[in-house]
Image: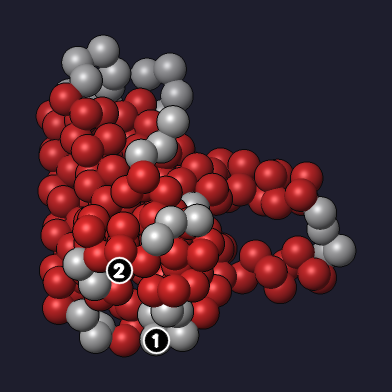
Amino acid sequence: MISKEENILFNAEKLFAEKGFDGTSIREISKEAQVNVSMISYYFGSKEKLFEKIFEYRMNESLSFAKDVLADQKMNEWEKLIAVINRYISRVKTLKTFYLIMQREQLTNKNEHIVKFLNESKMGFLEIYRQLIASGIQNKVFTKAPRLEFIHSTISGTIFSALNSLPIYKNFYKGDEEYENLYFEDLNNHIKNVLKYLLGYEENI
């Protein structure tokens, strides 16, 4: 069961995605979350602080999971990388609202605190990928060491390009919910196949 604070966060997230930061009022958020305006002030102080908290919450979720995977001694480097990607794509699929907000903020760069959260997240994932590749090479799981920047760009760039283009593709193929499910499943497989080539990974080695 979600907390009162999370209830406000999730409903605000939906409205910010639909209307943007400037187009969303505290009163609308309170109505959507079915709470008093005073409760929003109590938990967050202001609309801007609430907006920042959404990013802090989502960024921390992502990095915490990836760090836990990195520390797991039961998986090899390829299995860890795939676990991170599986989670990444699953989150993009289920949290479209947040990732649409995130991409919008990356283009505008208005809020320095949000820019800080985004940069810290990118740096965190770069470090995770760096450790996985270095360890994978050392343990002979990978036979190639591509530039870290391109691994990061391949994963994030492909996922977000696919997310942004989904409405067009869905309309072109007259797709339904099943189309969308298969789309993300095939996206996942596509990224894995690209990474196998880039990292020189072979199954059952």
Question: Residue 184, position in %: x, y?
Answer: 61, 48
Badge 1 local density, few (<14 within 10 Å), some, or many (20+)? few
Query: Going 14% across and 60% down the picture, which residue do you hit?
Result: 120
Please say if 14 is above or below 194. Answer: below
**Label disc, if present, on residue 51 of the rendered structure:** 2
Camera-side residue of 131 and 87: 87
Camera-side residue of 41 and 12: 41
Quadrant containing the N terminus is top left
Give the amino acid type for the residue marked by disc 2 in the picture: Phe
Cα distance between the residues tagged 2 and 1? 11 Å
In the rendered structure, the answer to whether residue 200 lies left or right of residue 186 reads left
Asked whether the viewer can see residue 20, the reply is no
| Residue 110: quadrant of the picture | bottom left
Residue that label 1 marks: 22
**Label disc, if present, on residue 42 of the rendered structure:** none
What's the image's color scheme? secondary structure
Sequence-wise, which precedes: disc 2 or disc 1? 1
SS class of the residue under badge 2?
Answer: helix
Please say if 173 is above or below 26. Answer: above
Question: Residue 203, position in %: x, y?
Answer: 45, 24
Camera-side residue of 186 and 45: 45
SS class of the residue under badge 1?
Answer: loop
What residue occupies the far right of the structure in this picture?
A: 174
In the rendered structure, the answer to whether residue 71 lies left or right of residue 181 reads left
Please say if 5 is above or below 203. Answer: below
